[in-house]
Image (cartoon, rainbow, N blue to C red):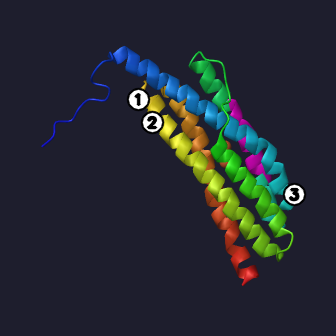
Amino acid sequence: MAREIPFNSDRKTEGDASAELRQLLLDQMGDLLHAENQLVKALPKMVKAAHSPTLRRGFSEHLEQTRGHVQRLQEAFELLGAKAKAIPCPGMKGLVEEGSETISDGKEMPEACADLALIIAAQKVEHYEISGYGSLRTLADRLGESRVARLLADNQAEEEQADELLTQAAQPLFEQAA
Ligand SMILES: [Fe+2]
Ligand SMILES: [Fe+2]
């Protein structure tokens, strides 16, 4: 059986590896910061497009939470002694573009269908964020940055909650659309 080779076993010392992991964490936090900033701009359009009052309220509450996510990320940068730097996130850009298309396509659809389409677009966004925060909190943990890991976990928990609320908001819409 092959012996497990420790990560980065050759060439580099442990110090280098952890500096690189730290940089990876900062870069990925920058990606999420950019993603969250894009959502602060996109969510008001989702609020406006939603027909169901529950969905509209859900989007607008998540807009507030999203502003909090930006703040927590900024705090996490501070804890790491780094400047908060957003790095363009093409992944979220694509999802936001899909969301915009969903909004315009929805104008031609029955209200419940249009709302369900918004939920589908929004859940893709939440899952992107959940996976981002999930990976990064583990990375922060491994680096011994427990306070940073906590902040990332708090964001992740709110994304999960938003995802769950979207699932719930879809239920009556399925009945209306049927
Ligand atoms: Fe977020
Ligand atoms: Fe979110």
Task: State the residue at coordinates (59%, 49%).
Answer: 128
Is 81 above or below relative to 34?
A: above
Disc 1 is placed on an element classified as: helix
Question: How far across and how far down the image is residue 12, in percent?
Answer: 33, 17
Residue 119 tag number: none
| Disc 1 crowd, CA 10 A, few/some/many (<14, 14-19, 20+) | few
Callout 1 amino acid:
Arg
Residue 48 tag number: 3
Asked if the stretch drawn in magenta spans residue 61, the answer is yes
| Disc 2 crowd, CA 10 A, few/some/many (<14, 14-19, 20+) | some
Task: State the residue at coordinates (55%, 42%).
Answer: 132
Q: Are marks 1 and 2 in contact (CB under 8 Å)?
A: yes
Q: Is residue 16 visible?
A: yes
Residue annotated with mark 1? 142
User: Which quadrant is the N terminus positioned in?
Assistant: top left
Q: Is mark 2 within 8 Å of ligand 1?
A: no
Q: Quadrant of residue 177?
A: bottom right
Task: Measure the alpha-carbon separation of dots 3 and 2.
Answer: 36 Å
Task: Measure the alpha-carbon separation of dots 3 and 1.
Answer: 41 Å
Q: Which portion, as a residue range, is magenta? A: 60-71
Callout 3 amino acid:
Lys
Q: Would residue 111 be found to the left or right of residue 90 on screen?
A: right
Disc 2 is placed on an element classified as: helix
Disc 3 is placed on an element classified as: helix
Question: How far across and how far down the image is residue 174, in percent?
Answer: 69, 77
Is 56 above or below relative to 24?
A: below
